[in-house]
Every structure is written in structure tokens, then in C-alpha cells.
Amino acid sequence: MSNRSEAGDARTVVVLGPRTRLGQQVVRQALAAGAEVVAVARHERDEKALSDSPATVVRIEELGRLAPGPVRVLVCAMGPVQSGDRVATADVERDLAAVDSLLAGATAAEVVLVSSVLALAPKADRRHYGGWKCLVEDRLTELAEAHGARLAVLYPGRLVEGERRGPRNLLGTRYLRLGSLVVNRQLGTSHRVVGLDARLWLLARGAQVAAGAISGSGGLAARHN
């Protein structure tokens, strides 16, 4: 049976970024769904922080030693988590190498990457953040293709806690909802913008870029003036 047909039956769920709020939600929901959950620790600080996790905690260097079988890899964080984060290239390369090793040993695999809508059209002050998100997506795409795995990418906007009120929070996506989408949906090979605020921002950003290109105030026209 091919990787594509078996991936949906995976009982082992590997979570990268289990300490983030989304990662915590994903771990809880995957365990509730009956999966065998592996929470990936990138270093000793992660191991200590995850010491009371109900999931099995594995150092990232050990991922390739997991027992062969179908697996779902849920990437809640890789590269910058916040837009102002500085990222060590060596750390990202280590994480990608670990995913490569994991996929190589899997009999079937599905990878779900939670990115950011900012990666689709970053403004000048978010280009570092957006560029890293795009780079991680490109590299995971290469790894998925190399191992016959499926890759789904989600582009949420602002993530909010469910109990918070206010107009901005009504437009955002709740961690609970995004966690459910990551864990419980068979996404296949897809790219999906998540959240009303993400869609509105992308429409507004697209219109801004188009207007700048037409008027000559932005894009290639501005750089050649």
C-alpha cells in the first residue's frame, strides 16, 4: 500500500513545537483522539518543561529511531515563533534533518505545517519572519516529495483564546479550532488560509500590492525609479 493511502491511518502523531499554545492544544486533542503522541524536545530546556507532559517526550536527535510505521508529523513551530524572533540557521537545519530521518523510516506519512498568513504577502517589517516561514515550507515540501509523504499547509491569522472577548478576537481563530483542524481533519495535500481575519488581511494586502504596482509607488516600478 502506498504512503498516500496509508497516512490517514497513522496512530503515531509527532508534534514539533509542543510547548507553544497551539502545540499544547494539539497534544491534548491528539491524545483524546486515541493517538500515540510524541512531543519533540529540541534541547534540555524543552525536556525539563515537558517533564509533566502526558505525551511521550523524545529529543529531536532521536526522532529517526522511532519504530517504523505510519506517522503524522504536526509542525506547530519551526523557525521563528514570533515576528521579531531571530533564528539560528543551524537549529532549523537540525530540525529539518530530524524530520527527514523520521520520514525515511515511516511506512506512510502526512505532514501538517502551521505557518502564518504573513508568509503569503509580508510587509517590509515582517519580511524576515515571512521569509523564514516560506523557507521552512519549501524545505518541508522537498522532504515530503522525496519520501512520498503528503503535505498540508495552514495559514492562520491571529490566534486567540476562546474565553477572550472583543471585536478583534471575534475575527481571529481560536486555538481550540485550529488544533481540531490540525489533529482531526484528513487534509491531504492542500494549502488553506484559516480565519476570517487572515482572509480579510490577505485581500487588503493584495489590493495594496496591486495598487502600488499600477501607480508605480511600489513593487518593481518603485525599485527601478
Image (cartoon, rainbow, N blue to C red):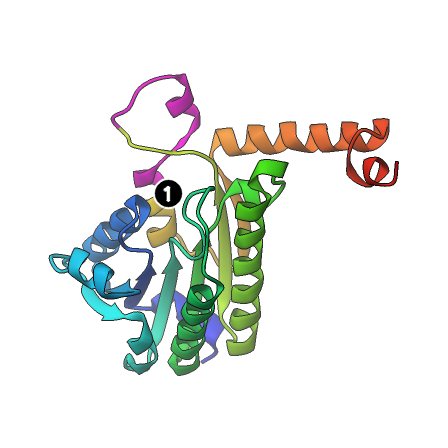
| Range drawn in magenta | 163-178
Residue drawn 46% across and 51% down?
Answer: 86
Q: Considering the numbered disc 1 on the image, is that residue within a helix, a strand or a loop?
A: helix
Q: In this picture, is 221 found above or below 217? A: below
Residue drawn 63% across and 37% down?
Answer: 124
Residue 205: percent from left, percent from top: 64, 31
Residue 147: percent from left, percent from top: 51, 77
Residue 173: percent from left, percent from top: 40, 34
- State the residue in front, 149 or 48: 48
Residue drawn 68% across and 33% down?
Answer: 206
Residue drawn 41% across and 48% down?
Answer: 81
Q: The disc labelled 1 sits on which kind of residue?
A: Leu
Q: Residue furthest top?
A: 166
Corner quadrant of residue 38:
bottom left
Please say whether residue 158 is one of the residues in the magenta stretch: no
Residue 109: percent from left, percent from top: 42, 71
Q: Residue furthest left?
A: 52
- State the residue in front, 9 or 45: 45
Relative placement, left or right, of 84 versus 57 is: right
Relative placement, left or right, of 41 versus 106 is: left
- State the residue in front, 221 or 109: 221
The residue carrying pointer 1 sits among few (fewer than 14), some (14 to 19) or many (20 or more) residues within 10 Å by Cα, namely many
Relative placement, left or right, of 32 versus 152 is: left
Q: In this picture, is 221 found above or below 109? A: above
Residue 174 can be seen in this image: yes
Residue 123 can be seen in this image: no
What residue sits right under mark 1 in the picture? 178
Please say whether residue 170 is one of the residues in the magenta stretch: yes
Q: Quadrant of the C terminus?
A: top right
